[in-house]
Amino acid sequence: MTDEELLIEFALARLDNPSLDLDEVAALLVRRGGTDRMIDLAARNLATRGELRGAVFESAVEHVLRVVLLVRGQTD
């Protein structure tokens, strides 16, 4: 999944769930994506952070948030 596809999916999920915070929408996407996508997103996040290990779900959610915030112009 490309970052652009991730952003589109995030935007659609946000429209469907306007009362959720950004991190809750990101967690929703990770849960919906299944195990393989969760592992892929977590691996991409850990590679970005230069780490070898991390909690899979939390790392995947962090990657989704990182992509969304980079597009919004915020840095972490």
Image (spheres, helix red, strand yellow):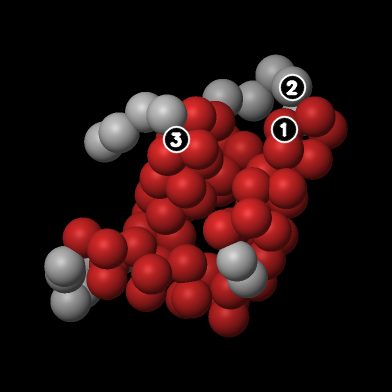
- Relative to 35, residue 41 above or below: above
Q: Residue 69's x, y, as percent? A: 44, 35
Q: Amino acid at mark 1?
A: Arg
Q: Estimate the spatial distance between the alpha carbons at disc 1 and disc 2, rounded to whole Å.
A: 6 Å
In the rendered structure, which disc, 3 or 2, sits on the residue that comes first in sequence? 2
- Relative to 6, residue 12 above or below: above
Asked which quadrant contains residue 37, the reply is bottom right
10 Å crowding of disc 1: few (<14), some (14-19), many (20+): some
10 Å crowding of disc 3: few (<14), some (14-19), many (20+): some
Q: Is residue 50 left or right of residue 39?
A: left
The answer to which of 73 and 1 lies nearer the viewer is: 73
Q: Is residue 52 left or right of residue 41?
A: left
Which residue is pictured at 16% across the width and 69% down the height?
51
Which residue is pictured at 42% across the width and 29% down the height?
73
Q: Secondary structure at mark 3?
A: helix
Q: Amino acid at mark 2?
A: Pro
Q: Residue 7's x, y, as percent? A: 64, 47
Q: Estimate the spatial distance between the alpha carbons at disc 3 and disc 2, rounded to whole Å.
A: 17 Å
Q: Which mark is residue 23?
A: none
The answer to which of 33 and 68 lies nearer the viewer is: 68
Q: Amino acid at mark 3?
A: Leu
Q: Which mark is residue 69?
A: 3
Q: Is residue 18 left or right of residue 4?
A: right
Q: Which mark is residue 18?
A: 2
Q: Secondary structure at mark 2?
A: loop
Residue of label 1: 14
Which residue is pictured at 53% across the width and 69% down the height?
38
Q: Residue 47's x, y, as percent? A: 27, 71
